[in-house]
């Protein structure tokens, strides 16, 4: 257990302390600490990881809003939401399964008149390959496009994918 603890600390030492990778290591390390009945340390790690994820999410949201074109509509004011027609569940990465990592990925996408998700961007990820698996799944989903005045238009949406081990 001392060696595992040392390895987690080494992994954190080589990462940018504010990176999504550091947040993922902190979450997994918190799980390890809980198993060692080190609740205070686990809570501290979870809180730090959450703060990093929230900051990353805020930056990603700002970037997405700045990049969204003028022909991308938001739901409301006569703009009807797209609806899901077909969905493929994302796979679990081997790394996340081994670490027993669970969580919710938040993704921004623009659903075009073609019913396909475009400009898919992770706003708040989970890590260990799950973010990429979620984006890959969304890229295979098909939608009935959103409309404005009865005509199909590109609509910005936020999608949440829950990764949970059974």
Image: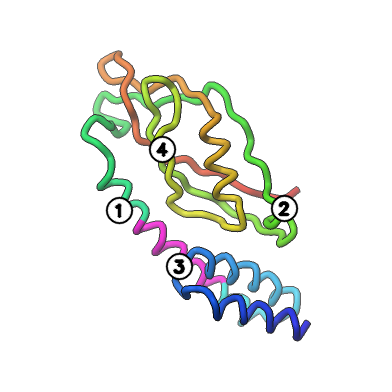
Disc 2, SS: helix
Question: Horizontal placement of 31 versus 143: left or right?
Answer: right
Residue matched to label 2: 94
Tell me, yes or no, whether the highlighted magenta stretch contains residue 68.
no
Task: Judge whether 3 appears above or below 152 on screen.
Answer: below
Mark 2 vs mark 1, foreground winner is 2
Q: In x, y percent, where is residue 10?
A: 62, 81
Task: Judge whether 55 appears above or below 66 on screen.
Answer: below
- Density class for disc 3 (Cα within 10 Å; few <14, some 14-19, many ≥20) is many
What number is the disc on residue 62? 1
Residue lying at the far front of the rendered structure = 14
Task: Judge whether 150 appears above or below 110 on screen.
Answer: above
Residue matched to label 3: 52
Quadrant in the rendering for residue 42: bottom right
- The span from disc 2 to disc 3 (Cα, nearest Å) is 24 Å
Quadrant in the rendering for residue 88: top right
Residue matched to label 4: 109
First along the sequence among labels 2 and 1:
1
Mark 2 vs mark 3, foreground winner is 2
First along the sequence among labels 2 and 3:
3
Q: Residue at x 70, y 81 (%)?
A: 5
Question: Horizontal placement of 64 versus 164: left or right?
Answer: left
Camera-side residue of 38 and 2: 2
Mark 2 vs 1: CB contact within 8 A: no
- The span from disc 1 to disc 3 (Cα, nearest Å) is 16 Å
Q: Residue at x 41, y 57 (%)?
A: 57
- The span from disc 4 to disc 1 (Cα, nearest Å) is 14 Å
Q: Which residues are magenta?
A: 46-59
- Density class for disc 2 (Cα within 10 Å; few <14, some 14-19, many ≥20) is few
First along the sequence among labels 1 and 3:
3
């Amino acid at each position: 257990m001392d060696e595992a603890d040392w390895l987690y600390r080494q992994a954190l030492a080589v990462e940018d302390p504010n990176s999504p990778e550091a947040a993922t290591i902190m979450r997994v390390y918190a799980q390890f600490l809980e198993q060692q009945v080190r609740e205070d340390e686990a809570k501290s790690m979870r809180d730090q990881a959450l703060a990093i994820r929230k900051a990353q999410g805020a930056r990603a949201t700002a970037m997405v809003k700045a990049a969204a074109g003028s022909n991308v509509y938001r739901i409301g004011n006569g703009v009807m939401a797209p609806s899901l027609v077909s969905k493929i569940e994302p796979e679990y990465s081997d790394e996340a399964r081994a670490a027993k990592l669970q969580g919710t990925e938040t993704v921004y996408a623009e659903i075009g008149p073609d019913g396909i998700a475009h400009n898919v961007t992770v706003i708040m990820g989970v890590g260990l390959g799950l973010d990429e698996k979620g984006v890959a799944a969304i890229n295979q989903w098909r939608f009935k496009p959103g409309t404005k005045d009865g005509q199909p238009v590109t609509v910005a949406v936020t999608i949440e994918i829950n990764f949970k081990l059974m």
